[in-house]
Image (cartoon, rainbow, N blue to C red):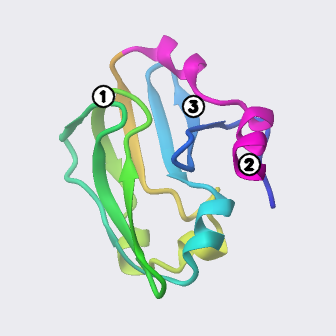
Amino acid sequence: MSTPEELRYTEEHEWVAVRDADTVRVGITEYAQDQLGDVVFVDLPEVGRQVDAGEAFGEVESTKSVSELFAPLDGEIVAVNGAVADSPELINSDPYGEGWLVEVRVSDAAAIDGLLDADAYQRVIEG
């Protein structure tokens, strides 16, 4: 399982990539997509929606189950990956690249430091 070092993670299996001073890109981890199986549908929020850390902002549906997506940080949704809405299987084939879900303008950039680093996330999935 791949856990890129440059990303931050949540215990709910989202990854966070810093795009610039106050914007992050969010997706689900390779571990999460592997647990879900073949992703067949993604429900993403509207651009402009305010989210709070820990709040459900969408869903990923697979052949096995439906899983909620949780905001890793407080902020505003500033971009949604339309390619994933059209081709949900991108989450399976490229979870850390083309399978990204949303971009969030974070309310407090310092909060990013409170997310898990790759080593801490690895310990979460190893249980």
Left or right: 37, with 64 as reference point? right
Instruction: Say how many tags the image has.
Output: 3
Q: Position of residue 67 (x, y in %)?
A: 40, 65
Disc 2 or disc 1, which is closer to the eye?
Answer: 2
Q: Which mark is residue 127?
A: 2
Q: Secondary structure at mark 2?
A: loop
Could you tell me how far apart the alpha carbons at marks 2 and 1 are, in whole angstroms? 30 Å
Q: Of marks 3 and 1, which one's residue comes earlier in the chain?
A: 3
Q: Is residue 24 above or below residue 113?
A: below
Main SS, magenta region, reads helix
Please give the name of the residue rendered at 52% of the width and 26% of the height, measured from the top-left corner: 20
Q: Secondary structure at mark 1?
A: strand
Q: Which residues are magenta?
A: 108-127
Q: Amino acid at mark 1?
A: Gly
Disc 2 or disc 3, which is closer to the eye?
Answer: 2
Q: Position of residue 104 (x, y in %)?
A: 37, 36
Q: Which mark is residue 75?
A: 1
| Label 2 crowd (10 A; few <14 / some 14-19 / many >=20) | few
Please give the name of the residue rendered at 37% of the width and 40% of the height, measured from the top-left corner: 71
Q: Which mark is residue 18?
A: 3
